[in-house]
Image (cartoon, rainbow, N blue to C red):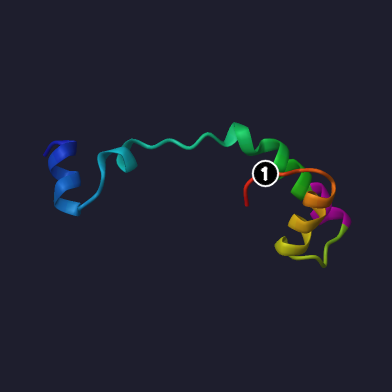
């Protein structure tokens, strides 16, 4: 079965099938969150995200 037929059968877009995420863009944000999580272990993601914003990081949530 071809990819086109399989995607049509599953009602899945072929672009979704071939999508590959680019995690290299997110490495600075992941590193900053990891450092903050180690410094403030009781804080959840929402609080850590606020700390990142206060530090000047304006990446998308």
> Would residue 55 be counted in the magenta stretch?
no
Mark 1 residue element? loop
Nearer to the camera, 53 or 43: 53
Quadrant position of residue 5: top left
Quadrant position of residue 48: bottom right
* Image: magenta residue range: 35-39
Residue at 33% from the left image edge and 36% from the top image edge: 18
Residue at 57% from the left image edge and 36% from the top image edge: 23
Residue at 79% from the left image edge and 50% from the top image edge: 52
Residue at 82% from the left image edge and 67% from the top image edge: 42
User: Where is residue 6 drawn, in percent x and y?
Assistant: 16, 45
> Would residue 36 be counted in the magenta stretch?
yes
User: Where is residue 36 drawn, in percent x and y?
Assistant: 83, 52
User: Where is residue 10 drawn, in percent x and y?
Assistant: 19, 53
User: Where is residue 15 drawn, in percent x and y?
Assistant: 31, 38
Asked if residue 26 is positioned above or below residue 61 in the image, the reply reads: above
From the image, give the main secondary structure of the stretch colored magenta.
Answer: helix
- Which residue has dot 1 on it? 59
- Quadrant placement of the N terminus: top left
């Amino acid at each position: 079965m071809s990819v086109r037929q399989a995607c049509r059968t599953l009602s899945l877009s072929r672009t979704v099938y071939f999508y590959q995420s680019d995690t290299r863009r997110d490495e600075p944000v992941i590193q900053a969150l990891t450092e903050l999580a180690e410094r403030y272990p009781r804080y959840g993601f929402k609080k850590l995200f606020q700390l990142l914003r206060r530090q000047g990081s304006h990446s998308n949530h």
